Image (tube, rainbow, N blue to C red):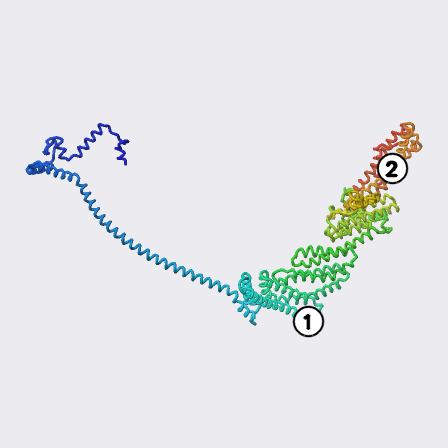
């Protein structure tokens, strides 16, 4: 391609000029001429001996030979025709001489063409043979394929027939197996506990399951009836075997001669005989339990086995249980707590043993186990309930509740919920009965021993009881901390705080009670006033009763009982305070009430419960108003429209339900606040009564003077307000402070026995006395008294009053 592009006519790679093209054309013509012609054209001759061109010897010889040949040829040529003939021959020879390679090649090509022709002929012959073979192969192949397809069809038909045969055989085996299974079940040598029997059950389940899936087949129902009959026979064999095993174990126990007193031996036999047969029965029951979910017959069989087992066990244990619990009741006659504890412990042991024995035979739980154990535990309930309903002592009832609730339910039942579920049900029922009895007896106790308590003379001997205890304490030899323990408290607790020593008193009364939290302080008894023996009996009974109830009843029940108990206790304290005030002085009565209300307030603090309860009441106010409206509208009783009086009465006269929250803590605080205010007012009047009376008269005078003749009559002109009279009033008040203030503080020390509490109560008293002197000074300043009159009166200043009160306090101590 590159050579063609080199001399391309239009776009040559090496273009030539016209002169170059002419020279190239001349050269090509010259080269195409024969050698001899070229010589003649150039003016040469046949003489090849040119002196101008050197020749070697061989060329010279060749030329000489040619010249000789030419001479010979010239001798032969005579005419023009001979010359032309010779010339033509010469040209041909020359041409042949020049193109001998091409001639050679052409001869070879011709030879090859002939060979190819022969080869083509042979190939055509071979193709003809191949076509013949192909046709024969096609014929043979078609025949072979037909044979193969036919063979494949035969194999397919054979496979289908084989599958059909197998399918028919598989289907028929579920129907033909009935005879074999019936014979095997009828064999007297068949054992229920053998593997062959279990294989029969497997075949029965498989065949029945298959027939149930294909119930539409012909005679499926007939064969199903036959299989059910076989299954019933098998189930009957299992039931008979298990029932006989349980019955034989029971008879072996009952046939043993055992005395009624030897209860442990009897229980050992009850469990030993059954445990001996457990492995054999367990294997059979395990297979039944595995099939219970598949077919109802097995489920009913398992239920019958359970029932047979529990029947035999109940036959063995029911009488022994009743006799054992009766024996415990006789052995613990009068000691109900020991009876409950020992009876429950015995039942716990029985329930655990029965639970373990049951699972030695069976592997799946059943509600019948709980029912059976409940029937055993009911014997304890039947024995204990008559005792419980006749218990009157709260302490005993509370202790029984504690045993049932803490020891049995929270300890045993909570730690073993599966084994003691039935026991827990019976104990819970028994606990409800005990709590019901406890609540009833608590109500009776609140009514008789708290609200309607009739105090004896010693209960109201205040402050003699406190003085006696103090004198006893002072008469004891001083022994370090022992003497200090009976002195007045140095605590910093206040009236409204919870920090006093009385919480430890109740803790000592209720020793062993784990439900009440420990007090937050640990002071020893610091005063005779703090000893619980000095508490008013209703206070002590209330607190002890509440502490028993707190760990014995539910929280919502305790809330109602505590509200009732505290309300009644507050009433009894108020009644006792009134009696002490009548017997002694109102000062003793109020301090007595403050002391015991403080005790109540503090002792109910450790109870982790809300003392607020909701009370429901009916409000008939609207009903009353509607009734008056109905009377006034008698004429419209049956009128039509919206003015029907009867309809208005029915709609508007419905009683309303009102809710009221009652908080026992707030009731105690309210009563305590009222008592403190009454004590402060009484002590203030006791110390400053002359001045207070004078101030009241002066206030009355100012009121009347302002209405009748203002600015004409002065207070100093009145007889009761003369300087001498006012001076006597001031002096009487100062004498009262000096004489009565030590008495008041002494009483506070005896009753309260707490410096901080005494200071809190005394501070408003001191302020009231100082305020009365200040009011007196204001009245004197507004009463037209001269300076001489004021000197005569000698009203002390606030600083002097403070000094007077402090000095009186020091003298009292």
Relative placement, left or right, of 243 versus 751 is left
Question: Vertically, is 477 above or below 761?
Answer: below
Q: What numbered label is drawn on residue 520?
A: none
Q: How many labels does the image show?
A: 2
Q: Mark 1 points at which residue?
A: 257
Residue at the outermost bottom position: 188
Within-10-Å neighbours for mark 1: few <14, some 14–19, many 20+: few
Residue at the outermost front position: 640
- Seen at 33% across and 57% down, the residue is 140
Residue at the outermost right position: 719
Horizontal and vertical percent for residue 656? 78, 46
Horizontal and vertical percent for residue 696? 88, 35
SS assignment at label 2: helix
Residue 488, can we see it? no
- Seen at 21% across and 29% down, the residue is 22
Q: Nearer the viewer, residue 382 or 72?
A: 72
Residue 408, can we see it? yes
Please identify the quadrant where the N terminus is shown: top left
Q: Which of marks 2 and 1 is in front?
A: 1
Q: What numbered label is drawn on residue 688?
A: 2
Relative placement, left or right, of 245 versus 607 is left
Q: Which of 303 and 753 is in front in this view?
A: 303
Q: Quadrant of residue 55?
A: top left
Q: Which of 88 and 550 is in front in this view?
A: 88
Horizontal and vertical percent for residue 394? 78, 55
């Amino acid at each position: 391609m590159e050579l063609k592009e080199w001399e391309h006519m239009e776009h040559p790679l090496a273009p030539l000029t016209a002169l170059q093209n002419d020279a190239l054309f001349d050269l090509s013509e010259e080269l195409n001429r024969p050698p001899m012609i070229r010589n003649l054209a150039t003016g040469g001759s046949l003489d090849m001996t040119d002196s101008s061109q050197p020749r070697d010897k061989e060329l010279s010889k060749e030329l000489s030979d040619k010249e000789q040949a030419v001479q010979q040829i010239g001798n032969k040529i005579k005419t023009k025709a001979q010359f032309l003939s010779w010339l033509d021959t010469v040209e041909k020879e020359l041409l042949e001489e020049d193109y001998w390679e091409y001639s050679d090649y052409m001869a070879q090509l011709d030879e090859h063409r002939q060979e190819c022709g022969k080869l083509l002929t042979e190939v055509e012959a071979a193709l003809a043979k191949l076509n013949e073979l192909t046709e024969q192969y096609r014929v043979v192949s078609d025949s072979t394929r037909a044979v193969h397809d036919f063979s494949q069809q035969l194999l397919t038909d054979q496979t289908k027939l084989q599958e059909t045969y197998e399918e028919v055989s598989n289907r028929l085996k579920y129907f033909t197996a009935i005879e074999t299974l019936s014979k095997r079940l009828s064999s007297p040598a068949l054992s229920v506990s053998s593997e062959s029997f279990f294989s029969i059950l497997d075949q029965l389940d498989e065949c029945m399951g298959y027939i149930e899936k294909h119930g539409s087949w012909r005679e499926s129902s007939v064969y199903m009836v036959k299989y059910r009959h076989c299954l019933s026979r098998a189930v009957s064999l299992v039931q008979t075997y298990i029932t006989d095993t349980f019955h034989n174990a029971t008879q072996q126990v009952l046939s043993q001669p055992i005395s009624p007193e030897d209860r442990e031996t009897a229980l050992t036999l009850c469990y030993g005989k059954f445990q001996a047969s457990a492995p054999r029965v367990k294997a059979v029951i395990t297979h039944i339990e595995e099939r219970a979910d598949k077919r109802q017959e097995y489920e009913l069989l398992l239920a019958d086995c359970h029932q047979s087992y529990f029947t035999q066990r109940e036959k063995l244990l029911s009488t022994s249980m009743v006799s054992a619990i009766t024996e415990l009741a006789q052995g613990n006659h009068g000691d109900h707590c020991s009876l409950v504890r020992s009876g429950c412990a015995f039942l716990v042991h029985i329930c655990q043993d029965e639970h373990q024995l049951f699972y030695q035979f069976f592997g799946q739980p059943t509600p019948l186990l709980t029912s059976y154990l409940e029937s055993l535990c009911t014997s304890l309930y039947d024995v204990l309930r008559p005792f419980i309903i006749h218990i009157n002592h709260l302490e005993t009832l509370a202790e029984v509740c504690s045993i049932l609730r803490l020891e049995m339910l929270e300890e045993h039942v909570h730690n073993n919920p599966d084994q003691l579920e039935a026991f827990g049900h019976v104990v819970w029922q028994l606990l409800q009965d005990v709590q019901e009895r406890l609540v009833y007896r608590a109500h009776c106790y609140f009514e008789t021993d708290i609200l309607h308590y009739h105090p004896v003379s010693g209960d109201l001997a205040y402050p003699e009881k406190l003085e006696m205890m103090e004198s006893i304490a002072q008469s004891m030899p001083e022994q370090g901390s022992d003497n200090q323990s009976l002195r007045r408290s140095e605590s910093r607790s206040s009236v409204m705080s919870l920090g006093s020593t009385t919480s430890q008193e109740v803790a000592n009364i209720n020793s062993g009670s784990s439900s009440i939290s420990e007090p937050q302080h640990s002071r020893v008894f610091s005063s005779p006033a703090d000893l619980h023996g000095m508490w008013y009996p209703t206070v002590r009974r209330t607190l002890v009763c509440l502490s028993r109830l707190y760990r014995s009843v539910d929280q919502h029940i305790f809330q109602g009982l505590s509200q009732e108990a505290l309300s009644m206790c507050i009433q009894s304290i108020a009644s006792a305070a009134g009696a002490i005030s009548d017997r002694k002085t109102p000062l003793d009565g109020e301090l007595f009430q403050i002391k015991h209300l403080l005790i109540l307030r503090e002792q109910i603090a450790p109870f982790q419960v809300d003392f607020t309860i909701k009370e429901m009441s009916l409000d008939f106010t609207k009903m009353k108003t509607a009734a008056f409206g109905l009377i006034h509208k008698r004429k419209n009783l049956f009128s039509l429209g919206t003015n029907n009086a009867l309809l208005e009465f029915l709609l508007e006269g419905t009683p309303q339900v009102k809710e009221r929250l009652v908080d026992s803590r707030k009731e105690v605080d309210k009563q305590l606040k009222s008592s403190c205010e009454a004590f402060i007012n009484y002590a203030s009047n006791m110390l400053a009564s002359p001045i207070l009376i004078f101030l009241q008269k002066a206030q009355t005078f100012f009121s009347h003077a302002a209405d009748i003749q203002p600015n004409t009559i002065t207070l100093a002109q009145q007889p009761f307000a003369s300087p001498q009279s006012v001076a006597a009033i001031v002096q009487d008040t100062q004498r009262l402070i000096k004489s009565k203030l030590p008495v008041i503080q002494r009483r506070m020390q005896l009753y309260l026995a707490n410096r901080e509490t005494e200071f809190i109560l005394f501070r408003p008293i001191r302020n009231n006395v100082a305020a009365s002197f200040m009011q007196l000074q204001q009245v004197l300043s507004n009463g037209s008294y001269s300076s001489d009159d004021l000197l005569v009166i000698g009203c002390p200043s606030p600083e002097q009053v403070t000094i007077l009160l402090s000095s009186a306090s020091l003298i009292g101590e």
